[in-house]
Amino acid sequence: MSRPEDEVIRARQRKSAKVTAWLLFAFIALTFFITIAKMTVNQ
Amino acid sequence: MSTIVQTRDLPADWRDLFALTKPRVMTLVVFTALCGLLAAPTGMHPVLAFASILCIAVGAGGAGALNMWYEADLDAKMKRTAKRPLPGGRLDPQTAFQFAIGLSVGSVVLMDLAANHLAAAILAFSIFFYAVVYTAWLKRRTPQNIVIGGAAGAFPPLIGWVAATGRIELLPVLLFLNIFLWTPPHFWALSLFVKTDYANAGVPMLPVIAGVESTRRQIALYSLPMAAVAIAPWPLGLTGAVYGVVATVLSAYFVFLSLRVLANKATDPAAMGPEKALFKFSILYQFAVFGALVVDRFL
């Protein structure tokens, strides 16, 4: 059984990982939409 | 066995990282940048406009985070800033620095992709200016720190304009000068009634070095060219009457409040009503003047 300290650390790591994943997804989506918008503008 | 975990040993909490970006300061940055972009004569694709404003906000967040990383020792000495993530011990400096660099570099790269090289270059320069010229170089060395450092906060409307047009023109330069000349009276009014805090931290703010009377004179002196620069776009034919009337009335009231500050002889922060009134109005002033610019553009 893990110690209470480990549980606090794991919970914080899970939260950080989720926020990082969302941010990376937003970054990729934004880059994609920028590329599409640039193509539209340059046509 | 103790169940207390030292906060510094924990992975960073996203709320502390978010606080590092100075979200309240970012509000005015985003607003003025958006106004600069919307006031530009060239339209911009909504996605590219959104991305450009986001880049300016993230760049400002990166610069703010670099500022907090470098100034953690100062922040710990001031009541107003002692609970920030770094002096509060909730975040380790290395994480804060990596986060700040990541935001700064990411915002410039994305700005280059979304807008143009010139907008990205000005964004990069403004981050450098705030983090290095103001924070690391001037803030602890000269009581004129705010005057030169204020330039960093004046870049957003210029970047917004350049993102849309790709050019630097007279109107965005006047918008830049308006914020540049507005910053000293805005911050000096604040530093008059929180002077003790700055003195304890050893920051050479003007009231600490030159005294209260000299600071009040400087506030009044700066408010005059600020008002002239704010009104100038109207007689120069760069904006219409809506902007002109709003800028003239609000700038006149700003000068009036500055003169009330000049006339105040109190040294006790509790009796500094005119200084507090000027500080509060100065925030409203920028929102209203830049808002009027956009309204004027679309009328």
Image (cartoon, helix red, strand yellow):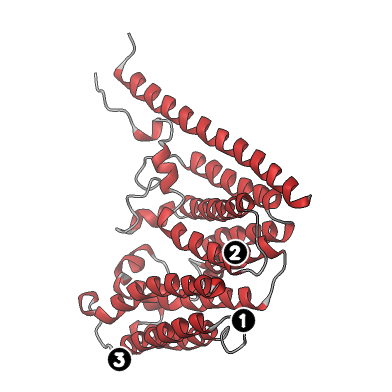
Going by the picture, which residue comes out furthest to the top?
Answer: A1
Looking at numbered disc 1 in the image, what kind of residue is underneath it? Leu
Disc 1 on helix, strand or loop? Answer: loop
Q: Where in the figure is residue B4, as x and y percent of width and height? A: 27, 27
- Distance from label 2 to label 1 (Cα)? 15 Å
Q: Nearer the viewer, residue B48 or A6?
A: B48
Residue at 36 percent of width and 53 percent of height? B76
Q: Which mark is residue B204?
A: none
- Quarter of the image where the N terminus of chain B is located: top left
Q: Calculate the distance from the C-alpha at mark 3 to the C-alpha at mark 1.
A: 35 Å
- Label 2 amino acid? Leu
> Which circle marks residue B263 in the picture?
3
Question: Looking at the rendered structure, which numbered label has been put on residue B238?
Answer: 1
In the rendered image, residue B137, in percent from the top left (x then y), is placed at 56, 64
The kind of secondary structure element at disc 2 is helix
Q: Earlier in the sequence, mark 2 or mark 1?
A: 2
Image quarter of residue A8: top left
- Of residues A16 and B114, the one drawn nearer to the viewer in this rendering: B114
Give the Cα separation between the discs numbered 3 and 2. Answer: 39 Å
Chain ID of residue with mark 1: B
Count of labels shown? 3
In this rendering, the answer to whether B103 lies above or below A7 is below
Q: Which residue is mark 2?
A: B37
Chain letter of the residue beneath label 2 in the structure image: B
Tell me where residue B131 sits by quadrant. bottom right
For label 1, the crowd category at 10 Å Cα-Cα, with few meaning under 14, some 14 to 19 and many 20 or more, is few
Q: Give a yes or no on whether discs 3 and 2 share a subunit.
A: yes
